[in-house]
Amino acid sequence: MPARQAVPPTTLASTAHDAVDLALAAVLSDTAEACRRAEAMAQDARAAGDEGGEAMGRLILAFVELREGELAAGIDRLDEAQAALSRHSHARGELLARHVRTQALRRQGRNDDALGELTRLHALAAQRPPVDAFFTVMALGTVQGMLDHQDNSLASFYAGLTIARRTGLPSLEVNALNNLGSVQLDLYNLEDAQPLLRRCLELSLAIGSRRQRIFAAGNLLQCLSAMGLNDEALVLARTHLIPVIQPGDPPVLQRDEEIAQALVASGCFDEARQYLARAPQSDVLTNATTATRVWLEMQVMVADGRSAKALTWGLAHCGLTDDATVMPLDRIRLIEYTAECARRCGKWRTAYEHQHRAYALKDVLLGRAARARFLSLQIEHELARAQAERDDAFELAHQLERANLDLHAQVRANEVLRQQLESLALEDPLTGLCNRRALFQAGQAALDQARRTGSDVALALVDLDHFKAINDRHGHDAGDRVLQAFAEVARQAVRPGDVVCRYGGEEFVVVFAGASAQVAHERMNRVLAAFSGLTHEGTAGQAFGCTFSAGVAGTAGGVATLAELLQLADRALYVAKEAGRARIVDGTA
C-alpha cells in the first residue's frame, strides 16, 4: 500500500501534552527517542532541584529497560525511582511506578500477580492521565490473552483503542490497533483482524515508526497467510520486513518465523532455510515457545524429501499442541502437517488420529471466531454508547469472564468426549483402513465441517466385482491380498482430510471432504483404472485380475446426513452392477 509522508515522532503530539506523555508515547514508536526524552527530562528536573521530576525520567528509563532490556538493571532503576517518588508524594509517578512494576512481574513469569495489579490500576483509570490509563489497559489485555482470557482481552483492547484516540497520540493508536488485530487473529476472527492490521500498518508508515511498522507487518502477514493470500503475504515480507529489520535489532523486532512463513508458502525454500537456521528470538514480555518454527521446518523437510524426519520432528513437539499459550492456528497447522507427514510415510492410524484432532480444534476455533465477531460488535456498541460509564464497563467485564468460564467448561467437556472417542477401536485389522465405526464418526464430522463452511462432501460406495468367485477359485488368502491391494490403491489416491474405510466384506467407502460428486466420480475413475491394471496371484500361482463397481453421491442436492449419502450411493452401486460392473455411477447426477 502507498505510504504517507513520514512525520518524525517528535513532532506528532500536540503541545498540550507534557514531557511525560511524549516520552511514554515514544516508548511504543522509538525506544531510543523515549530514552533521549527521559534523560532530558531528568537533567532538566535535576537542574531545577525537582527530585520528583528527575525520578519520573528515571522511571521511564526503567520502563524501557523492563520491556526489552536487562531485568535486574531495570528492577534496580525502578526501585530507585519508586523510592524517590514516594518521598515526594508524586501521585502520578507512584501509580505509574506500580504499572512499570507489572512489567517486572511479567518478565518473571508471574502473570497472575501482574493480572491482579493491572486490574486494580485499571479500576483507577478515571483518576489517571489518559496516556497512563492507556498503558495499563493495554498491558491488562496482553496478560489476559496470555492467560487465555480471550474475551476479557478483547474488551480491554477495545477500551485501549478508545483511550488512544482520545489522547491524539498516533503511536498509541497504532499500538492499540496492532494488539486488537492480533487478538482477533488469535481468535480466528480474520474478518475483523485484517482491516485493523491494515490500518495499523498504514498509520505506522504515516508516523515513520520503523518499530511499529515491523510489528504491524508481522501480524498482518500472519493474517494474510491464514486467509490463503500467500502472494500478498510475500510482497509484505519483501517490502516491510526483510529490508527494514536490521541485524542489530533487539529480539522483539526480529521476525524470522513470519518471514519464513511467507517464503515457504510461496515455495521459496532456499531463502526460508536461511531464516529458520538462525537462533529463535523471543519477546521478553510475551510467550517464549512457538509452534510456528516447528511446522515451518517440517514443510522444508518435506520439500527436501525427508517426510520421515518431518514426522519425527512433529511428533517430538506434539506437546506444543496442548500448550494454551501457543496460537490456535499454529497448533492446528502443527497437527495437520504431522498428519500429512504420517500419510506420506504410510502411518495411517497416526495420520487419521492427527487429522481427526485437527478437525476438533478447528471446530473450537470456528466457534471462538464467531463468538469474537459477536463480542466485537457488542463491545463497540457499548463503548460508543457509554465510553465514560465505568460501572457499565465493569459489568461487561464480569459478563465476559463468566462467558469465558462457560467456554472453558465446554472445551473440557469436548476434550473428555474426544478422548473417549479416540479410545474406541477405529481400524480394520486386515487392510489398516478405518473401520465402519470410524466411518460414521469421521464421515459425520466431515459433513458437519462442510455445513459450517458452506462446502460440499461426496461419498463413494465400492464393491469388488465377483469377489466370492475369487475366494472360491483362488482361495481366501488370495482374496485377502486383493482387499489389501485395493486399500493401498485407494490410500494413494486420496488427499489429506479424505477418509477411506472398509465398510464390510468386499465393500469400501471413500469420503471426499470439500469435493462435489463430479470430482469424486473423476477420482474414483482413476482408482478403478489403477486397480484394474493390477495382476494378482492365486494360491496355486495362477494370475488373475479384479475390478470394482461404485456408486457416488454428494451433498449438493441438500443431503444432510451420512446415512442419506450412503443410501444414494448404494442405489447408484446397484445401477453400476446392473449395467455390467467395472464402472462408476453418480447417484446425484
Image (spheres, rainbow, N blue to C red):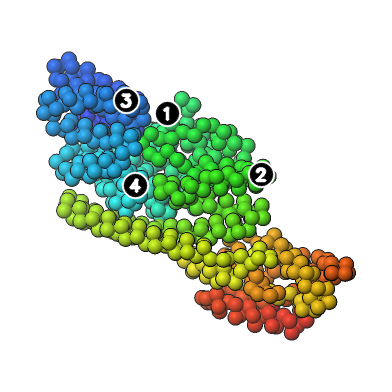
Residue located farthest toward the top when viewing the structure as drawn: 47
Residue assigned mark 1: 250
- The answer to which of marks 1 and 4 sits earlier in the sequence is 4
- Determine whether, in the image, residue 236 is placed left or right of residue 377: right
Mark 1 and mark 3 lie on one chain; the one further toward the N terminus is 3
Rendering coords of residue 367 (x, y %): 40, 61
Given residues 13 and 335, the one toward you in this image is 335
Of the image marks 4 and 2, the number of the one nearer the N terminus: 4
Vertical arrangement, residue 75 with respect to residue 494, above or below: above
Q: Nearer the viewer, residue 490 or 303?
A: 490
- State which quadrant residue 100 falls in: top left
Image-based side of 234 in relation to 537, left or right: left
Q: Are marks 4 and 2 in contact (CB under 8 Å)?
A: no
Q: Which residue is mark 2?
A: 306
**Which is more N-terminal, label 2 or label 1?**
1
Residue 45 x, y percent position in the rendering = 18, 19
Per the image, the residue denoted by label 4 is 147
Q: CA distance from mark 1 to mark 4?
A: 25 Å
Please name the residue shown 60% across and 59% down the image.
349
Instruction: Tell which residue pokes out farthest to the bottom in this image.
Output: 578
Q: Quadrant of residue 354?
A: bottom right
Q: Do residues under tags 1 and 4 come within 8 Å of each other at their CB atoms?
A: no
- Disc 3: which residue: 72
